[in-house]
Structures are given as C-alpha cells and as structure tokens.
Image (spheres, rainbow, N blue to C red):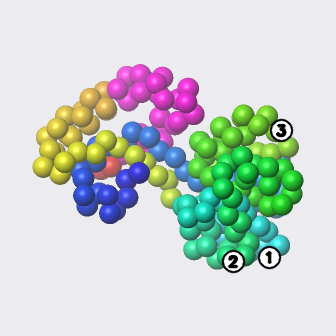
Amino acid sequence: FMKPERCAAVAYSQPILCDAEALLVPAGNPKGFESYADIAADDSATMGAPGGGTEEKLALDAGVPRDRVIVVPDAQSGLKMLQDGRIDVYSLPVLSLNDLLAKSGDTNLEVFAPVKDAPVYCDGAAFNQRDTDLRDAFDVELAKLKESGEFAAIIEPYGFSAEAAISTDRD
C-alpha cells in the first residue's frame, strides 16, 4: 500500500488497486454500524479484528475500548465468531469480506462498506526514486489500459474496483 513512509522511499506509479475497510454484520445491520465510532458508542458492542492489523488500530483510535476489540487469528474464525454471536461485527477490507461472505454462503450476514471515516488504501508499482522517467512511462501505459476498459476487464472478475483506482489517482 502507498503509505507516507513508503512514499518517502520509492516513487510510486498511479494507483493500480484500491480497497476500503468494511464491516461484516448480521443481515440488515441491526445495530446500524457504519463506522468504528458507531461501535465505540455502543457500550455492549464487541468487534473482531486481526491482531496488529489496520482494523484493530482504527477501532482503538476511534475509541472502541481494548476489551471490546477481540483479536481473531484468521478470517474464518472471525466469521464463525460472528455467526455464533460471540462478536457483533467483524472488520476487514471490502474485498476480503466480500470473498469470505461469498465462500461461506451465509445469507444471514452482509457486508457494510466502506466504513465511514476510514481510509481507502491503494497500491502501485514502486520505482527507484531516481527512475521517475520509467515511472512516468509506466503511468502513461497504465492510463491507456484504464481508458480502454481493458484494466476493468482484467481486475473486476477478482472483485477489485477499476473505478476506485481511477478516482484516487496520485496527482
């Protein structure tokens, strides 16, 4: 992902793939969770997240108390904990939760995305900072691929959004 500390070390291309945070909740989102702050505001709510991951940090930063952020070892465990009612919400990026939900076939759950007030993360090709001519040439070809519709045809079958990568261009 393009992060400030990484941008200081490399010259990134325009975004190639982007993803946002999401919440896996019971169907109908009965508690109305749309943000980590919503979870923090519900004194009874518990949330599952990968330990040390972005979702855990975002939840804690939004005020969800440590004892209500349940660290889960993997996505399947988070899904199972939500299905069993041991947590009220599970958080991962949109693509991860959409894939998890599709593979589970559980119609009693749904994905809410994007989480309000959470960042959208993009990745790009990383170039040596002295190779900006190469990076710029790459960006020209990437733009052609996006404009032609071929970019969308390549990435969208895998659940990625071509529109998200186009609307968050680096410049």
SS state under label 1: loop
Residue 164 is covered by the magenta coloring? yes
Residue 28 seen in the current view: no
Q: Residue placed at 23% from the left, 50% from the top?
A: 11
Residue 133 is covered by the magenta coloring? no
What is the C-alpha distance between the residues marked 1 and 2?
A: 9 Å
Query: Looking at the rendered structure, which numbered label has been put on residue 53?
Result: none
Q: How crowded is mark 1: few (under 14 residues within 10 Å), some or many (20 or more)?
A: few
Residue type indicated by callout 1: Asp
Image quarter of residue 135? top left
Nearest the viewer among 10 and 76 is 76
Quickly name the residue at label 1: 43
Looking at the picture, how far across and down is residue 159, in whole percent?
A: 57, 34
SS state under label 3: loop
Mark 1 or mark 3: whose residue is earlier in sequence: 1
Query: Looking at the rendered structure, which numbered label has been put on residue 65?
Result: 2
Q: Residue placed at 48% from the left, 37% from the top?
A: 163
Q: Residue placed at 24% from the left, 53% from the top?
A: 10
Residue type indicated by callout 2: Pro
Quickly name the residue at label 3: 107
Mark 3 or mark 2: whose residue is earlier in sequence: 2
Magenta-highlighted residues: 145-169
Residue type indicated by callout 3: Thr
SS state under label 2: loop
Q: In the figure, is residue 21 to the left or right of 10?
A: right
What is the C-alpha distance between the residues marked 3 and 2?
A: 30 Å
